[in-house]
Every structure is written in C-alpha cells, then in structure tokens.
Image (cartoon, rainbow, N blue to C red):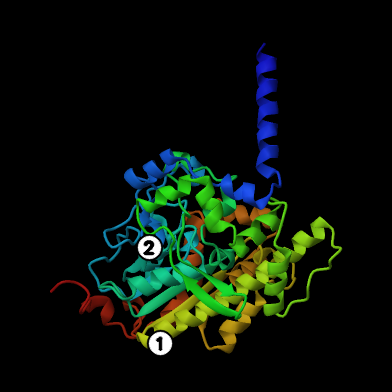
Amino acid sequence: MRVAVVLNAVLLSMTFAQVQNEAVPFARYLRESAVPKSVIDTFLNENSWAQFDGELGYILGNYLPRDGMDRSLTLSTTQANGQRTSFLYVNRPCRINTYGDSFTQCHQVSDGETWQEYLAAHLGEPIRNFGMGGYGVYQTYRRMRREEQREHAAKYVIFYVWGDDHIRSLLRCRHASFYRWWNHQGGRMFHNNFWPYVEMDLTTGRWVERENLLPTRESLYKMTDADWMYENLHDDLALQMYVFAQGYASDIDVEAVGQLAQRLDLPPAESTSPAKELRAYVRHVLDKYSLAATKYVLARAGEFADQHGKRLLVVLFDPGRVLPRLVEGQARYDQEIVDFLRENGFTYFDMNVVHAEDFKCFRLTYEQYRRRYFIGHYNPSGNHFFAFAIKDTIVNWLDPKPITYRPGDDSMIRFKDYLPE
C-alpha cells in the first residue's frame, strides 16, 4: 500500500510539473496568472517580505524568510522611510544612497550582512539601502527619483543594474512572467504586482513611461479576476515575448514583434522558421528591446542627477548570462550598455570583470566558484567581497574622502567633527 501511495505521489508530481511547463495559448496563460484572494489579503494585512506601495507596487516589508545560508532565517526589516534597516554610524550624516533590485537590497542575508553595512563599517559613515527584490532598471529609477526629493536625499547615488533588470523595466506586472514557479508562501512572499513601467510606442518609436495600473490597496484585488488580468496584459508585448521565448505560451504576435524589430533596426524573422528558432529570434529581439530601454532609463537617471547636483555611480553585474561568458573568454551580450556608459561619461563599476579576474585565482569549475559567494543571491561572504571590490571606486568618488581615507595622521587621534564634543 505504501509503495502505491508513493508511486501515486510521484506521478501526480510529474503531472503537475508537466502542466507547469506546458506551452498554452497566451490568453489562457494570462487568465491562469490571477492571484488567490487569500494571497492578496495576507500581503496587504500581515507582516510580509514586501509591503504595498501605491507608486512602485511594493517596497521592502518586515519578515523572516528561511532563505539564508545553512537554511537559516534572515532578518529582513525596513525603517520608517522605506530603507532597509541599518545600524552602523546612523547618527552621522549620510552621503550615499543605493538603489537597485535584490542584489542591492541583499536578499537572503540579514540586515547587518549587507554590502552597504560592510562598507559603512570600513568607511566610518552610513550608507542607505533602498534596494528591493524584483525591481527592474525603470522601477529603480522611479524609486531613486522619489527618494532623492525627500528629506533623506543624498549627494552620492549608486544605481545598480543586475541581470535581467533590463527586461523587468518593460513589464507591467512581473508576477505574470513567473507565477508558474514562484511560491508566494500564502502571500508572505508575494511581490512583483503591477508597477510603473516603460515601453516603446511602435507607431512613433518613442519611449513612453507608464504609471502603475493598480495604485491603491483596494484596486490590487483586481489581480484576483482572471478576465481583468487578460484584458490588462494581453497587449503587453514584452511579457508575451518573454513567456513565448520561455516556452510558457504557444503563440506570439508576429506582426508586433516585426514592427518592434524594425524600430530596433533588426532583421525580420524567417517566415518559415521552426518554433525553436522563432523562440530564439523573439528572445534576441526582446534582449535588444530591453537593452535599449536600459539606455533610455540610464540617460534619464543621469539627467536627474545633473539637475539635482548629484553624483551618480552605475553598477553592472549579471552572474547568470554575462559572467559565465567572460569566464570562458566570450563576448558579453550586454556590451552595448558598457559602451553606452563609457561613451556618455558615466561613472560606472563592472562587477562582472572583477569576478572574472577573481575566478582566475582558483582551480575550480564555474559552479564550484559560485558556491563560494552565492546561495542564489550573495551569501554574507559574497556581500563582503562586493563591498571591498567596489571600495576603491567609492573612496575615489567621494569628496571629501571618508574619515578612514583622509590624508594626515591627526584625524586618527582627534576625531574632530566625528565624535561628540
């Protein structure tokens, strides 16, 4: 009897996995993305990893996810102003605010194990963390633009661009891109609801910035309605391209993809392309679309910084698609972003290059190397490595230098303007 029960469980699991990976019509895929009401209830009314935000969709909340090293719980909390909780030198003036996705937020470690806290300890001054898991480049820009006009604005701004952040900028609701495999844990890990986004008007070829379609707590319950999800996402071209390329959707708006390719100066798809080749072509067009969006957003971020007298530092890191290619001595797919930053005079720091050089110091496979620093996101050692990798860039960027890097010896004994009189 026990063998039969186990066998049935295995068969059910295999069937579920097949359904999860099944390519279905895009309309059906969207309707199946509707969220259970109980998940929205928990997200809005209980302590959870993320909390609702009317403009951005969500920001960091207060929770203890069991996602840390050695399966530990991680203390993930936020302060009244929306930044991740920090401890070091918080009574001192803050010159640096940081923005980005989960690699800025430092998901999977506790509040005191972020790269910002490690760096603050070394520099002797606080560094604020406004990163949030799931954000794309555009959502990071919107967070930066908002916070840098509030009382906690800073002169120095770090803008972190990670992995597939390029594509996230284009999505109206990232939840619809990964709901098949994400575990919301009943709502406590729910996020990536509707948010502001950017897209190209295919008629004019111009970029258009769009607002969050669900800006109130009450309106968020529309995500429980399958028909509403379809009506408001069926013309999200970036989403359709992404799920088609992933093999989740069986159909694609070939005409719209062709228009987009033309706007991006890309060749059209072969009309007789088999499905596998068509999916690869759509992914290529989506990559180019998303990188073009990133260049638009970075230009906007640079303009904002200039207009408000701020210094901007852009960080690049992609351990999924860029770093493995650099390790193998191959060309990176995002080279046009590096070229854009260099040609337009941005100050930037490329963590991909740092890791590629560090990899040469070991006789390990790439996967063995990753386990030194990653548990999905950086582990505490990874955040420490990043902090000291970027340290020189930040010290050279700041004026005046942090107290630990100022010239002369007297500061070491006087602590003028540092300790209370």
Quarter residue 264 falls in: bottom right
Q: Position of residue 194 (x, y in %)?
A: 46, 58
Image quarter (top left, top right, bottom left or bottom right) of the C terminus: bottom left
Location of mark 2 (residue): 117
Which residue does the image show at 53% across and 67% down from the upper left?
Answer: 169
Tell me the kind of residue under disc 1. Asp
Mark 2 Cα within 10 Å, few/some/many (few <14, many 20+)?
Answer: many
Furthest residue in direction top, as rendered:
1
Q: Tell me the distance, in whole angstroms, between the alpha carbons under discs 2 and 1.
A: 27 Å
Which residue does the image show at 56% across and 74% down from the upper left?
Answer: 294
Question: In this rendering, which labeled residue sits more in front, label 2 or label 1?
Answer: 1
Of 272 and 319, nearer the camera is: 272
- Disc number placed over residue 306 in the picture, else none: 1
Q: Is residue 377 visible?
A: no
Q: Is residue 232 visible?
A: yes
Which residue does the image show at 65% across and 17% down from the upper left?
Answer: 5
Q: Position of residue 128 (x, y in %)?
A: 35, 67
Of 246 and 345, nearer the camera is: 246
Tell me the kind of residue under disc 2. Glu
Furthest residue in direction left, as rendered:
421
Quarter residue 32 falls in: top right
* Secondary structure beneath label 2: helix
Q: Position of residue 97 (x, y in %)?
A: 37, 71
Image quarter (top left, top right, bottom left or bottom right) of the N terminus: top right
